[in-house]
Amino acid sequence: MTAVIEVKGLVKDYRTRFLLRPTRAVHDISFTVEAGQVFGLIGPNGAGKTTTIRVLMGLIRATAGEVRLFGQRAPSRKSRARIGFLPESPYFYDYLTAAELCDLAGRLCGVDRATRRKRTEELLDLVGLDRARNTRLKKYSKGMLQRAGIAQALIHDPDLVVLDEPMSGLDPIGRKEVRDIIGSLGERGKTVFFSSHILSDVETICDHVTIVAAGRVRGAGAIHELVDTTTRGYDVSLALPDDFSDESIARLEAAAAGSRRIEGELRLRLDPEGDVDALLALANELDARVRAVEPRHETLEDLFLEATRAGREESEKLEEARP
C-alpha cells in the first residue's frame, strides 16, 4: 500500500516569555497512514494530538523530525491541495449559509463554479443538511456545524481528510451522525485521519490507531492486533421476578465473583475460572430469566487507561528530576 502520511521522530517544543526552558509537547512520535485507511490518533487531553495535526497541516513548524504527505515533505502546496481539513472547534462566519460556506471553500480551493454547485448539493445531502442548506450557520447546533465543517472540507474531493476531535462536545445523536459520515468516507476509499479521546467511536470506525500520552507513542497498530481478545470471564445479566426472594439472590451472588442489583435486574461477574454453565443452570432453577451473557476481554479503553497512566507517571518523574 502507498503511504499517505509518514511521521518520523516528530518533536515539537514551545517557548514562552514566562518559561526559562521550552516545554516539549511532542516527543519523538512516529507513525504511518496507508491509502484508504481510517486512522485514529487517540489519547487524553494534552497528549499532543492537536500539535501533531497542526504540524501535518503546516500551521506550525516541527522542532525536529520529518513529516511527509503523499511522499512530499510537509508543508508543501501540492500535497496540501489534496487534503480536506476540519480543525477542533472551528469558527465559521455565522452569517453564511451551509451552501455559501461550501461555495466559499470551493472558491478558495480553485474549484470551478459548476463543480462547486454540484459538489455542494451532493455533500450537504451526504452530511444530512440538504433541508438546512439555506439556513444561516448562527442558527445551527454544534452537531450541525460539525457536519457543515465536514462538507466544506470535502468540497474539492480531497484524497486525505484530516479531522481534529470531530466528535468532541457532541451529544450521542450528533456523534453517531459524524461517525456515520466518517464511515461512509472510508467506504468510498478516502483516507481519513482523525484524533479523538472517545474510544467507542474509534473502535467502531477505525482500521488502525496510534495511542499517544504525554507526547509519546504508547501503542500502535490494528485494533485487533493491539487488543487481547482472550476471554477473561463473563458478565451475566438476570431479570428477577417481583417476588424473587433474598435467599435466592444470595445463592446467585455466592456463585459469582461480584454482583450488582439494578431495579429488578441482577448483574453477576464471573472470573475466568468461574463456571458459567452452572450459574445459568442455577438461574433457571430459581426462575430468573437470563437477559445476557457477555464474555469479558481486554478493550481499547484498557490500553488507553494504561497508556495514560504511564504517561502521567513519566511526566511526574521528569518534574521531580528538574532542578
Image (cartoon, rainbow, N blue to C red):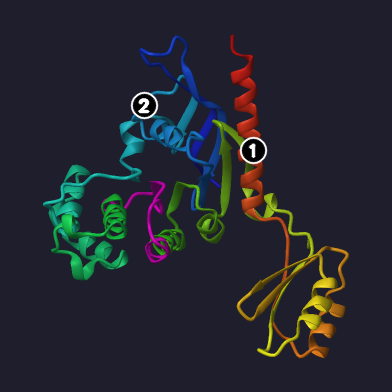
Please, is residue 282 above or below residue 54 in the view?
A: below
**Can residue 64 be seen here?**
no
Q: What's drawn in magenta, residue-wise? A: 155-177
The residue indicated by pointer 1 is 309
The residue indicated by pointer 2 is 60
Most foreground residue, 16 or 53? 16
The residue shown at (68%, 49%) is 226
Q: Position of residue 308 (x, y in %)?
A: 60, 39
Mark 1 and mark 2 lie on one chain; the one further toward the N terminus is 2
**Residue pushed farthest left?**
95
Q: Position of residue 242 (x, y in %)?
A: 66, 89
Secondary structure of residue under mark 1 = helix
289 horizontally vs 61: left or right: right
**Can residue 201 be seen here?**
yes
Please, is residue 277 above or below residue 114 in the view?
A: below
**Residue pushed farthest front?**
246
